[in-house]
Image (spheres, rainbow, N blue to C red):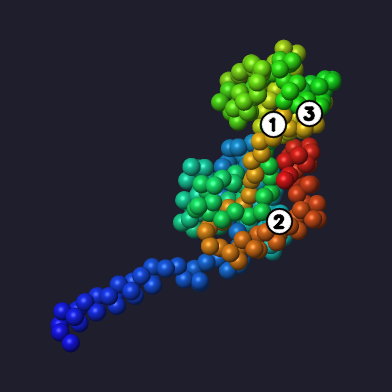
Amino acid sequence: MKPDILLKAASLAVAAFIGIQALPSRAEAQEAFTSLKVGADPDYRPISFTDESGKLVGFDVDFATALGKHMGVPVDYQGMAWDGIIPALQAKKIDAITSIVVTDERKKVVDFSDPIMKQTIIGVVRADSKNTDLTAADLSKLKVGVMGNTSAATALSKIGGVEPASYNTVVDAYNDLLLGRIDVVAVESVNGSYIVATKYPDKLKVVAKPLTPDVKLNAVALRKGDAAGLAQVNKAIAEMKKDGTMEKIAMKWFGNTSVLP
């Protein structure tokens, strides 16, 4: 065989070997969690936030803790910058993001568990209000308040005949509602339910149904290809839904179970 042919054959063999080595091995995939390191935004009430003692608390903290118990593994819950949380997951700095909105773009880079939470646009009214069965069609007849540049504001903009009062903060909107200057605050269910349950249980209440059909689902995000780990997480989630754990956590943080899918 000629030297140049031998050299070419050797080069091809090396290239093939490198290509094989570059592929992720089965051993690199998450076969089963023996511990669970979780990352989360430390300042998103009531999902995860730091209390006065410096401890991370919230719906997601309780969920992640219960998830670990149902999986039989210890949990290390860490706060970190949200814009770098998926890269942290991919780099194996954390094992999971236990509460993140499912989107088609994110599905390209992470695998999602079964849904654990949903967010809708809800109405919050005064406790003595008769407007407990509001629908989108009723809003044009009422004085509606909403925080600007939010999902709730976007949803209202798609409803004909509604010209809401826009506020810089949702706190301002709630204050005007309490003072009787507006009839209803349109807000994301995660915030609205929490505020009613924890701050104004005797002064405000959530209307019976969401104001719009828009629903965003939250789930646990894992690294792409962690099939066995995903099955382990989904099994634990199913058990938590069945034994009432999810309802208990939702009631603690929101005062109702409307956030559950």
Residue 184 seen by the camera: no
Callout 2 secondary element: helix
In the drawing, does residue 206 fall left or right of residue 9? right
Label 1 amino acid?
Answer: Thr
Alpha carbon separation for disc pair 2 and 3: 28 Å
Q: Nearer the viewer, mark 3 or mark 1?
A: 1
Q: Which mark is residue 212?
A: 1
Q: Residue at image x 78%, y 47%?
A: 247
Quarter residue 7 falls in: bottom left
Q: Which residue is mark 2?
A: 237
Q: Which residue is mark 3?
A: 207
In the drawing, does residue 238 fall left or right of residue 53? right
Q: Which mark is residue 44?
A: none
In primary-sequence order, the first of circles 2 and 3 is 3
Residue 179, given in percent of the width and then of the height, sits at: 74, 14
Asked if the residue at tag 3 contacts the one at tag 2, i.e. Cβ–Cβ closer than 8 Å, the answer is no
Compared to 12, does 37 lie above or below?
above
In primary-sequence order, the first of circles 2 and 1 is 1
Q: Residue at image x 68%, y 42%?
A: 118
Q: Nearer the viewer, residue 115 or 249?
A: 115
Label 2 amino acid?
Answer: Ile
